[in-house]
Amino acid sequence: MSKKEKKERKIRVVIAKPGLDSHDRGAKVVARALRDAGMEVIYTGLRQTPEQIVETALQEDVDVIGLSILSGAHSTLFPRIMNLLKKKGLSDVLVFAGGIIPQEDVPGLKKIGIKEVFGPGTTTSTLVEFVRKNAPKRE
Amino acid sequence: MPSLTNIQQLVSGVQKGDKRSIARTISIIENNEPEAQKIISLLYPKTGKAHILGITGPPGAGKSTLIEKLVKELRNRGKTVGVVAVDPTSPFSGGAFLGDRVRMQDLSTDPGVYIRSMATRNHPGGLAKATKDATRVLDASGKDVVIVETVGAGQSEVEVVKVALTTIVVLAPGLGDDIQAIKAGQMEIGDIFVVNKADRENANRSVSDIEAMLEMATEKKGWKPLVVKTSALTGEGIAELLERIDEHIQYLKTGAIDERKKERIENELVEALNQKITESIINELKEKDEWNRLTQKILSMETDPYSAADKLLAEQLKRTRKH
């Protein structure tokens, strides 16, 4: 493959908002930052069920899923998402989370396969670097 | 990287309608991976059954919302549907924000629907380079209808007519007057015009502006474009739109479809040849000393790119004739 053709491979990310949050400013900031870093970001909008998020990731053939949650339902919703990903054969997809998630919940979330949890104050450059470094290499 | 058996697995997965296989296959084509051409050649014979619907129009006219309603109505009628929704790639960062799914959330878990967001990757004309082949993948997967949504398009983005069998131009009230309606480009490509947001003021005015423009057509073609008023918000006009689409399908079946398809295939063949010929000749030329010599000469203003191209081409033709 020539150099030029290789360039056409882009990191595809879905940014999703599971649960009943009513605002998505943070998710949009993250989506925008990843877009500006040259990635293709699929945005789902608010109030997504785990099924919808996993189906979107599957149909869009993404490398990365970013979950944004403020409602406190992460301990219920995230395990369901991770189980569904496994069931659909998408275990190689990188999953990270952000929003309002208490520190004491983080180890449990990492245990079920969420690679990193970002809290308020995270810089977008930290995030971009994290995604670039950890996105699965398919080639 | 998929091996040959994987390619066959992917192709048979696509034909069974397996969403994962469809997703991977579209990525391979989109990324122009080496297997792309092989995959297309295997899938191509399985295509031609789906009706390809193109939806275009300016940003914010309500294309995605209208598609959501259309798909739901098609599903009620027992049809399976594929959607390829295109949004622009940033010419600055190369990234893209693909937001069409936001309006189609309810459809993502429907087993009879497959939605794919696609960035233009700076391909001009309102679609991505891979959009047409993505519709083929969905066609081969057995979808009855495949809908292509262009980027929020301006006046000159008309590439959708090369992909769709029925092109729908979606407009909204208040976007312009009868002068906008008469301009060349987008307003020439609609088989059906939709004035969406009919719940808003001035919708009737927009309908009559478009109808007046259509009346002015001097060249009588077989199909007279129609105008439909819809509200994607309330669902008004969606059933009527589907009826108009059916009418257009019936019209195409009277023979126009063969003509459309033939013209399109010829264009595609020319494009494919152009690309392959240019690529192979340029790769060959770049290996010649003449290439570097002429590049230097252009740099030092001793010659210009056009004269240099003439020279390179003349010598290449001489070499080809000797063979």
Image: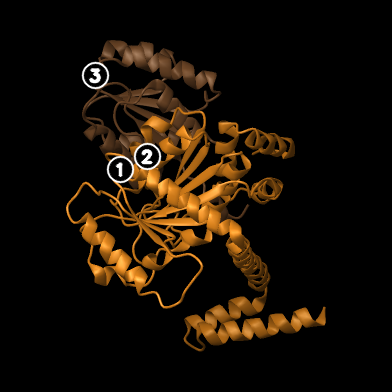
Residue under label 1, please give it. B236
Q: Chain of mark 2?
A: B
In the rendered image, residue A45, in percent from the top left (x then y), is placed at: 31, 33
2 vs 3, front mark: 2
The Cα atoms of the two marked residues, 2 and 3, are separated by: 30 Å
Which residue occupies the foreground of this view, B136 or B304? B136
> Label 2 neighbourhood size at 10 Å, few (<14), some (14-19), many (20+)?
many
Q: Position of residue A98 (x, y in %)?
A: 30, 25
Secondary structure beneath dot 1 equals loop
Residue type (three-letter) at the residue carrying disc 2: Lys
When the figure is inspected, residue B135 is found, relative to residue A67, above or below; the finding is: below
Tell me, by letter, which chain the rendering colours brown: A
Q: Gap in Å between the C-alphas at discs 3 and 1?
A: 36 Å
Locate residue A138: give its quadrant.
Answer: top right
* Numbered mark located on residue A71 in the image: 3
Q: Chain of mark 1?
A: B
Horizontally, residue B199 falls left or right of residue B308, namely: left
